[in-house]
Image: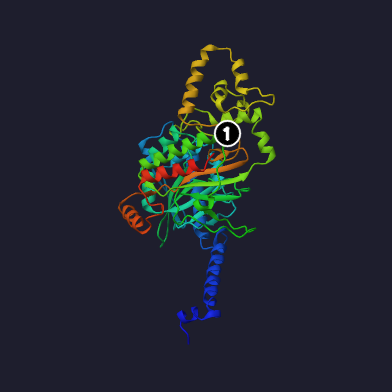
Amino acid sequence: MMNRAEMEMSGPGMSRPRRTVKRRRWGRLRQQWKLLGLFEIDQQHEFYSLTCMMKEGLYAAVQNTIDSPLPDELSEKDYNLEVTQIHKDFRMETYAGPVFASLRRSLGMTEKEYQQSLSSEGSYLQFISNSKSKADFFLTNDKRFFLKTQSKREVRFLLSNLRIYMEHLEKYPHSLLVKFLGVHRIKMAHQRMKYFIVMQSVFYPDDRITARYDIKGCEMSRWTDPAPEGSQIIVVLKDLNFEGQFIKLDQQCPWFLRQVEIDTAFLQTLNVLDYSLLLAHQPLHQDELSQSLSFATLIMRAKKSVNATSSPTHATSPTVPGVVAEEDSAPLSSELHSTQCHMPSGNDGTDIASLEEDRIEQPSRVGAESADLQMFQAQNRRLLPNFKNPLHVIDGPEQRYFIGIIDIFTVYGFKKRLEHLWKKLRYPRQTFSTVSPPAYCHRLCQWVQDHTK
């Protein structure tokens, strides 16, 4: 009987084992594809009991916020607050509830709206990706919020840096950083406790998204085989899949490059690495292209974009895009003046901003408007789209892009330093994700600059 070496040297039969290996690899790949995507967590699902408890616990936790008015200003007590609620089969702890509630309000989100999404009758969805993370990912039925299990260390890291995270969002209300909306711990009898966080989904709404990418700015292990053509499987692609393509933003390009620099510089101060720039795109419809030039839409975009008098740390009113009341739909002259550098022209070529300036007859207001404009520019604000999830949506000339920075929990500690040294020896000519936070920050910014126009 021939051994493997003899078979490979035996002329016509030499390719048979190779074909077998290829068939096995293809079979494993097909099996992996079957596991990728979104799955409804029905009564037969392994996570059905857990997600039902999550729903019940979150409903009660949010109701507690509804019943307890938020303070005018957040205190140290609010950041350290832990509330335990006991249910029939489990207990749930909510961390820093008033802090996250104030952030939700600053995003124009009502507590009832948030509660309804987290606790609707529809089942949660399990999201299985090609990520190496050991965490479990769940989506609310409307796909608006992500729930992700986290380690105790990661939760402690987030809570210990929550204040400076909130301060960053206050200073830069249009930040691309993922918005954390709640941190909880659930404890069931005779089982290990589970920590989980609630986040705003960057890819919401995803009805028309044609491609999704997870970008880290490096090469090693940054290719993912796309899903078969015509497949409904959701595959998150990586850096090498994006080569030869560009994020085409036109007038929004300088804002985007600057905001990535600002957010990654903040993450560098946290001494973290391995975070990702999530990116997805979909083509703009013809009606969306024409709508972006209308004066009414411009007013709504300005309303969403400018509110310099409030912040996430003050719970009285929204900071960044919020609900615009019908009776308050008239534009403030200062808002329109603030957006002058981005204003489209009218159909006759007239600059809309200049028309508004002609209408302003009170010279005493010029100083205030100039101050508003300076604050607007210093905070790197932009005209937000009149669309759901506006903080993570940027419209280019032809495509709508969904962009956000996620996974900010990996600290560059002793283990990561050793991993960096090993990879440097093992892969001397390749770029890999495990580098120092300054190098990681610079490299991702460079990738964005090279791939945006």
Along the viewing direction, whichever of 417 and 178 lies nearer the viewer? 417
Residue 172 x, y percent position in the rendering: 45, 34
Which residue is under mark 1? 323
Residue 192 x, y percent position in the rendering: 40, 60
To which quarter of the image does residue 289 belong? top right
Residue at 42 percent of width and 37 percent of height = 166
Which SS class for mark 1? loop
Residue that sits furthest to the front in the current view: 11
Neighbours of disc 1 within 10 Å: few (<14), some (14-19), many (20+):
some
Q: Quadrant of the C terminus?
A: top right
In the displayed structure, would residue 47 be above or below residue 255?
Answer: below
Along the viewing direction, whichever of 392 and 259 lies nearer the viewer? 259
Residue 397 x, y percent position in the rendering: 62, 37
Residue 227 x, y percent position in the rendering: 58, 58
Dot 1 amino acid type:
Val
Tell me, yes or no, if residue 151 can be seen here. Answer: yes
Numbered label tally:
1
Tell me, yes or no, if residue 203 can be seen here. Answer: no
Residue that sits furthest to the bottom in the current view: 1
Residue that sits furthest to the left in the current view: 414
- Colour pattern of the rendering: rainbow
